[in-house]
Amino acid sequence: MGEVIAVLSGKGGTGKTSVCAGLGTALAQMGKQVLCIDCDVGLRNLDIALGISQLGALSFWEVCRGEYSPEQAARHPVYPNLRFLTAPMDCPADSIDPVAFSAMLRQARNQFHYILLDAPAGIDAGFRLAAGSADRILLVTGADPAAIRDAAQASEKLELMGKQNIRLIVNRISRKMAAAMDLTVDDIMDQAGLPLLGLVPEDPDVVLAAAFRQPLLGYTGKGAAAACKRIAKRILGWKVPVRL
Ligand SMILES: Nc1ncnc2c1ncn2[C@@H]1O[C@H](COP(=O)(O)OP(=O)(O)OP(=O)(O)O)[C@@H](O)[C@H]1O
Ligand SMILES: [Mg+2]
C-alpha cells in the first residue's frame, strides 16, 4: 500500500515544488514507483522542476472524474518509474471535491509506493485538499524567523485538522547564514515546534536545472540534489545524519 506525502508550507516560495521534484526523482532513482501530483491549481509549475513537458499530461482532475486511472499519468522521460499528473487550469481549488480527490489517491496507493503532492502556497482550499488525504506531511520553510513562524502556524492548523506525522524541511540554508544567525538544528526545531526531516542548502543549480528544463538530480549530484537524496533515504526509514 503506497504512502501519500503532502509537501506544504504556510508562506509562498519556500521551495515546495523544488523539494517535491527532488524527492520524487530521488525515490524513483532508488527504484520506487512514484506519482508526483501538482496540486497548485492555476499556478502549476511542478512539470518544470521535474524537467518534464506538461503538454498532453493528464491533470489530476481528469483522473478524479474517473476518465482515466492514475497509472495513465505521464511517464517521466528519464525516470520511467516516475509519473506525473498536472493541475487543472480551469477549476478553482475550492471547487475540487475532496471525496473524489481521496478516492483517486486510494486508487493510486495500489499502484505506487509514494504519491507526492505539491501543494499551493497559503493555508486555504489547496492546502486542505493536499493535507486532507496525506499520510505524512513535509512542511518546507526557510531558516528566517518569519518563515519558521509561518511553518509553526501551518503546523497548528494541521494539528487542528487532526493530522500527525508532520516533519520540517528547512530549505535554502547555508553554513554562513546559520553561523551568522547563531542558528542550530535544535533552535529551528524549538522555534517551529516540529521534528526536522532535513536541510537543503541554498544552491544556484536549483534555478539552473529548471532553466535548462532538467530535473535537479539529472543536472547535478551535489548540493540541494544530494540533500534531497538524503531526505528520500530518511523517508525510506534509513538512518542518515542531518547535515548541511
Ligand atoms: N535550495 C534552493 N536554492 C536555490 N534556489 C532555490 C532553492 N529552492 C528553491 N529555489 C528557487 O526558489 C524559487 C521558489 O521555489 P519553488 O517554486 O520550489 O517554491 P514554492 O514553495 O513551490 O513556491 P509557491 O509557493 O509559489 O508554489 C524558485 O525560483 C526555485 O528555483
Ligand atoms: Mg510551488
Image: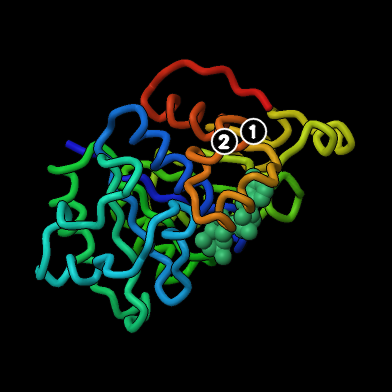
Give x and y (percent) for residue 107: 13, 51
**Residue 200: which disc?**
none
Would you say residue 72 is visible in this rendering?
yes
Residue in view at x 33 percent, y 57 percent: 37
Q: Residue furthest bottom?
A: 90
Look at the image and tell me in which quarter the N terminus lies.
Answer: top left
Residue kind at label 1, given as amino acid type: Gly
**In front: 156, or 185?**
185
Q: Circle 1 sits in a helix, a strand or a loop, which is it?
A: helix
Give x and y (percent) for residue 95: 30, 80
- Tell whether 9 sits left or right of 238: right
- Tell whether 227 sits left or right of 92: right
Q: Circle 2 sits in a helix, a strand or a loop, which is it?
A: loop
**In front: 208, or 89?**
208
Q: Is residue 129 above or below residue 82?
A: below
Residue in view at x 44 percent, y 31 percent: 232
Separation of disc 1 and disc 2 at Cα?
Answer: 8 Å
Give x and y (percent) for residue 103: 15, 59
Question: Dot 2: few (<14), some (14–19), or many (≥20) neighbours within 10 Å?
Answer: some
Q: Is residue 167 above or below residue 156?
A: above
Q: Ligand 1: does it lie within 8 Å of the C-beta at label 1?
A: yes
- Tell whether 17 sits left or right of 236: right
Residue kind at label 2, given as amino acid type: Thr
Residue in view at x 40 percent, y 73 percent: 41
* Labels 1, 2: front one: 2
**Residue 220: which disc?**
2
Q: How many marks?
A: 2
From the image, tell me which residue sits under label 1.
Answer: 223
Give x and y (percent) for residue 171: 64, 43
- Tags 1 and 2 in contact by the CB under 8 Å rule? yes
